[in-house]
Image: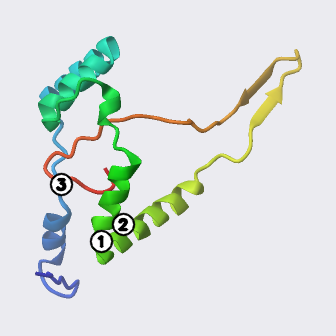
Amino acid sequence: MLRRLSTARPGFDRQLAKLIAFDTTFDKEVEDRVKKICEDVRRRGDAAVLKYTKRFDRVDRKRVAALELSQKVLQDSLRRLDRKQRSALEQAAARIRRYHRQQLAKTQKSITETDGTTLGQRVSALDRVGLYVPGGEAAYPSS
């Protein structure tokens, strides 16, 4: 159900504040748990990733490579999407790509000091990265 607010009605500010409020409480316990997990992954690598994948996602694999979805699985999943969902996801992906292209650094910057020292910045893309994004209460396509 769509809820409409009018700036002309009494109580608008209070109603709006209630709608857009979110909990900014910092949870030290959660941060400590996350730090321990990150440290474990730094220390033990793939073994820790597999342990947490089994624990949080209930996916049990012997090798990290087995977590990667094959092109066949991805293509089959794409074919099973209904037309409206696929269109919405493709539109979102195009918008995300368009937005982030604007963030790409197009030039390198450098200066040479009077003593001959060269200082600069070089931005280069990564060929491949891996990350874990838990779904939590909701699993979003962007995750």
Q: Quadrant of residue 90?
A: bottom left
Q: SS for tag 1?
A: helix
Circles 2 and 1: CB atoms closer than 8 Å: yes
52 relative to 85, above or below: above
Q: Position of residue 52 (x, y in %)?
A: 19, 27
Which residue was labeled with disc 3?
22
Q: Which residue corresponds to mark 1?
A: 85
**Most extreme residue toward the bottom, as rendered?**
8
Q: Amino acid at mark 2?
A: Leu
Residue at left offset 20%, top offset 46%: 135
The mark found on residue 89 in the picture is: 2
Camera-near label (2 vs 3) is 2
- The amino acid beneath tag 1 is Gln
- Nearest to N terminus: mark 1 or mark 3: 3
Residue visible at 20% across and 64% down? 20
- At numbered mark 2, what does the secondary structure look like: helix, strand or loop? helix
The location of residue 10, given as percent across then percent down, is: 12, 83
Q: Quadrant of residue 30?
A: top left
| Closer-to-camera residue (123/7) | 123
Q: Is residue 19 above or below residue 22?
A: below
Count the marks: 3
Crowd class of label 2 (few under 14; some 14 to 19; many from 20; radius 10 Å): some
Residue 35, image x, y percentages: 25, 22
